[in-house]
Image (cartoon, helix red, strand yellow):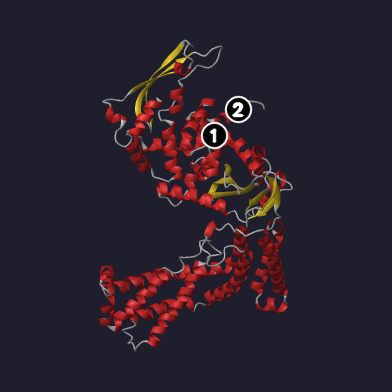
Amino acid sequence: MKLLQEQLATFHGRYRLKNLLPELPRLYFSAADALPPKASRRVLKTVPRRILHTLTFGSFIASEQILEGRNGAPPLHAETLRRLVPPRCRYGYDLIVFCGLELYVHGRQVEEIKTRIKQKSAVNISASEIQVLGYKFLKYLGRLHRHSLPAIRHQMVVAGGYILHLDSTCEEKDPLLLSCIDGRSRQVLYSKKIRSENKTELKKILETIKELLGVPLAVVTDMGRAFIHAIAMVFPGVAHVICHYHFLRDVGKDFLSADYDTLRRALSQKQIKAVLRSLAKNIEQKLGGPEKISTVFEQPDCQAYFAQAQKQELVRWYTLQLLYEIQFAGRHGDGYGFPFDRPHLAYYEKLETTMTQARGLVQEAAPLSPRDKKELLKLETVLETILDDTSILKAIKALREKIDFFDRLRQIMRLARQGEKHGLNDNGALADHSDLKTIEKELTAYMTTLAKRAGRVDFKKRHPQLAAGLKKMVQQIRCYWSKLFMSPIVVTVDGKPQEIVAQRTNNLMERSFRQIKRRCRRRHGRKKLQKDLETLPEEIALVENLHNEQYVTTVLGRLDQLPEKFAELDREQPLTLKAMKRTDSAVFSKMIFKQLRQNDIKNLVKNRLQTSKI
């Protein structure tokens, strides 16, 4: 079998097994191949022929001879066949791994995978079977991970310990996918589907982690109260750090949301974008349509065209560019989301700039007749409905006052600062622990300044809303102060003391979830992923480990050894697809529903309560 595999690898790309032979090859497997030369066992049975499919050998017909075990031992199966194909399955381990990697690591679509499999092995496989094999891949990966936890734990102990990052993600409603990552090695340690982030479920999960991996050096989470209570119960005395990014985001939302929502609603109600789009379309038609506009720019020297154009046409071109600049304004934030990026405010500020430019043309250019500047006047009229609205002006004024205070807080925290387009890739990395001490000192001084300003009588009279917002900000900082900063933890690595400090953010969790969702959208094109989170098993989070070199070395040795590792799992305890589905922790199990309905449990219970004394 090994020799055949080597020969096929040599001719790969030039020949296919299916093309070399007039019909499917017949391969015979016997448990006697693994016995010593003189050993003999009674043949228990010969399994009827079945067609099997692998990526390496393509399709073939297999017959297996099973031998009787000694002294009541289980029957002996052909080891060669068991290394190729799982028990009671038609598709080989290499196909399971290939489908899983293509679906969940590379995010390829089913039709793409079908084509690639046919090119590699001439195996025709249905779209539904690819999905099933992908599901099996995730379940095998989960079993392999659990089997390797002792080795992973030993590795982390040798390195001085692990820092536990916890977070969950969802789409609109339950279920939530909760994931646990080691902040030092970036390995996904545990994943679980839960109904909600409640204290009871989180406590059970943390107790499981404690049993499997030991007590962490520190825990990093968001600001959820359930996390805070559960961690205090399961890991008393362990440093608990809240994510600085989540902290800044929540403080900023509470501080800015009221005025920002007023601006957002006003822009929506005015339907300003729809009006401006209509005006742009009208100007494009008067300029000859999109094709004529493209033709102008395709000329070697478009300046010659504009040198001959009349005033009215020139003003239309000028107005069209203003409209396009508005259309694409506010789209390019720093990738952090609100309250760090404020696209509606950026859009409003672009309207202000456009109004200044429109009026500037009228004042600075040669005299223009009302007919010449007709479209420009229409644009000014539309902009005035926004820029002269008193409720919007009030919200903008309050928002700009508050933004100065919030952006100063961002500068102090050295995180999500303006102009730094790192987005969720910003881990808040610092040069050393002294920088964290500097942040703590500056934040203490800033908090004192805010408290004094918010408490001044004259300031409260002139700015009652701002004073209340500043007071609440100070209260939030004080509430979470003990979990914002941690001292270095000294551990011993290779006999030498080493200082360890937890990451300031949980953004590595956010990036992990983002990658999972991005690949889901790549596979099927849907924006909403509610169905995916319901149907995908919780092991989906473990796929990220396959990008982790340390994890691959510890668990697999090499990534191409995945089929062999899966085969070893089945030699210890084979699982069917049905058994795999029983391990799913879905919010509502279809299997349970089917059993409830088949057994008519409602009427059974009703009759029992009516006819019996309980």
Q: Is residue 585 visible?
A: no
Q: Which residue is mark 2?
A: 608
Return the x and y of residue 78 as percentages of the image width and height. 45, 20
Give amino acid for label 2.
Arg
* Quadrant location of the C terminus in the rendered image: top right
Report how far apart the C-alphas of labels 2 and 1 lie in the structure.
41 Å
* Disc number for residue 143: 1
User: Would you identify the image quadrant in which residue 609 lies?
Assistant: top right
Counting labels gives 2
**In the current view of this chain or complex, which residue is farthest to the front?**
495
* 439 horizontally vs 134: left or right: right
Pick whichever of labels 2 and 1 is earlier in the sequence: 1
The residue lying toward the viewer, choosing from 164 and 327, is 164
* 427 horizontally vs 200: left or right: left
Return the x and y of residue 395 as percentages of the image width and height. 56, 73
Q: Is residue 376 visible?
A: yes
Sort mark 1 into few (<14), some (14-19) or many (20+) by Cα contacts within 10 Å. Answer: some
Residue shown at the point (40%, 25%) measured from the top left: 1
Q: Secondary structure at mark 1?
A: helix
